[in-house]
Image (spheres, rainbow, N blue to C red):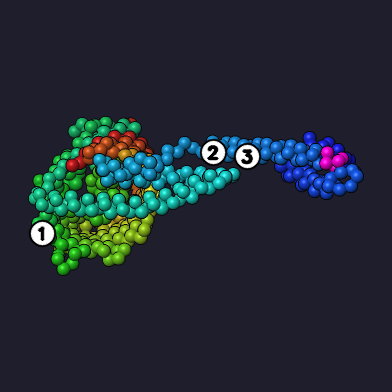
Amino acid sequence: MYFVLFTIMVSTFSFAQNSNELKAKLDEIDKEILKTSKSAQEGDNAGIFKQHLEKLIKEKAQYEKLLKQVSKSSKSSKISEDQNSRKILPTVVRQDLEKFKAWQDETLPLEKRYDLILSEMSNLYEMNGRLTGLETKDEEILKTIKENKTRLKQLEELKVEYEIKIREADDHEFSEQKKAGVRVGMMADIYYQWDFNNPRRNTDGSAEVLYKNYTNRHNDLTINLLEINVAKSYKRMDAYADIDFGEQPEQNKPHDSDAIATHLGQAFLRYRPKMFNDTSLTVGKFYSHFGYEVSKNIENRTYSRPFYYTLVCPFWHEGVSVNRSNLGPFSVSGFIYDRTDDRVDNNSGKTYGLQVGYTFEKLSATYNGISGSELNSAGENTEGNYKTQHEVILSYQATERLTLITDAVIGKNEGYDVDTGRDQSWYSLVGYADYRTHSTNSLGLRVENFTETTSSKAANNLFTTTANPTVRPPSIMAYTLTNRYNLGQGAEIRAELRYDNSNKEIFSSDTSGEFVKDQTTITLGWLYSI
């Protein structure tokens, strides 16, 4: 009987293909050994059973050896499978801060070390995303994911620590500047632009790209702005002035301007009462609070301005503002202005402004409002003619590198058309997506819709010009792609591609002074500030 079982066991050896089958055979051998060992100790056939027992023990050793080989082969196959799975991962540069500690290099600026921390966080987020998406995960992959999460938590704390250090360094620098007395700075803004409509040159030799403030020259290397700024602080009083030259101050000046209006971009005094540390009072000439984009190119994400800025946004004011910050997540500012974009207020009416800001974690929101008496279409400034605008700006820090912004504006100029008594009205919606591709480079997309809703029966609208007096109020879509590259030491280069499309013929072309529905421009700007 035992010889029969042994024969069957040996015959099935070649068919044991996996570890489960081998383990089952080993169990059978162990049972057979147990029975055989008892028979080998007693009876007339004890010698035969001893011989059979020896064979069983040898057979068990062979099965155990085979099981080890199968297990080893299976493990190697699993490792090979995991290695093949890892091949689908992209090449991710893991800047392990524990190894080379670049962010601790005291010879690097704080901002550079901060960028290294952000870069490492981005790499770890990307790696964990890839690893989590794998269908097969061994213990090593799960361990890596866990270690990355721990590292990310540490880096989050470091990020906050360095943000505090940078703010403290800025505050210290400002304090040192105050001790130094008068602070003098300089800014340069130069650009070259090509309009593919190739507009005809004017009698003065210039070729104008319509509806683009500060970037309206075609095929000319243009000095947009050369600025010297001077500041002085004493105790709780600050004095500030911008002295400007170039194309931008020429466009900012009113029709009846003098040298002060043209070349003095800003000039104001700011006082911070001791009993109200978070309150400031500003008096003088300063840029308008209205609009997401501001007058100086270097402070914007793009190079050219949106249509609403060119057509309806005030550039600067003379007046008074009161700002109150640190109201929890809120800040509030109030403004009283003389007439917009002019030094002389030729009626008793004023323009009033309000700004309310709210910040919560990654989201910030701003409301801007402005209303006051303005010029009508006959150039008369009357008490009954009011220009009122409302604006809501939302900004969301989607990731460490990606910022999303929306800017919505709606406005009306009451009784602007003296011939018909009709109002001008408009609305605009602008969206921004700004992505920092590198610590020194950012890519931004701006999409804008500007629609004028002035009645077609009105004699004048926002797009009425001497050259194109019969144009009807249009609806415009504009797409702008801007790349900003920081050269360091205050220098920056911007390359911008922009496409504007309208449902009316409003853009100039090279065909006998005719107007067309679209225009495409490419602009290269160079900016420098110290």
Q: Farthest residue toward the bottom?
A: 275
Q: Nearer the viewer, residue 143 or 376?
A: 143
> Can the viewer see residue 434 in this picture?
no
Look at label 2 and name its amino acid.
Arg
Residue 24, percent from left and from top: 76, 45
Look at label 1 and name its amino acid.
Lys
Residue 144, percent from left and from top: 49, 46
Q: For numbered disc 1, what is the local secondary structure? A: loop
Residue 322, percent from left and from top: 19, 63
Mark 3–mark 2 contact, CB under 8 Å?
A: no
| Magenta part, dominant SS | helix
Tag 1 or tag 2, which sits nearer the N-term? 2
Tag 3 or tag 1, which sits nearer the N-term? 3
Is 360 colored magenta in this rendering? no
How busy is the neighbourhood of tag 3: few (under 14 within 10 Å), some, or many (20 plus)? few
How busy is the neighbourhood of tag 1: few (under 14 within 10 Å), some, or many (20 plus)? few
> Which residue is under mark 3?
75
Mark 2–mark 1 distance (CA, rounded to whole Å): 62 Å
Q: For numbered disc 3, what is the local secondary structure? A: helix
Residue 142's tag is none
Looking at the rendering, the stretch of residues picked out in magenta corresponds to 47-51
- Residue pictured at 71% horizontal, 42% vertical: 19
Mark 3–mark 2 distance (CA, rounded to whole Å): 16 Å
Residue 46 in the figure: left or right of residue 177: right
Residue 66 occupies which quadrant of the picture? top right
Q: For numbered disc 2, what is the local secondary structure? A: helix
Residue 86's tag is 2
Above or below 511: residue 447? below
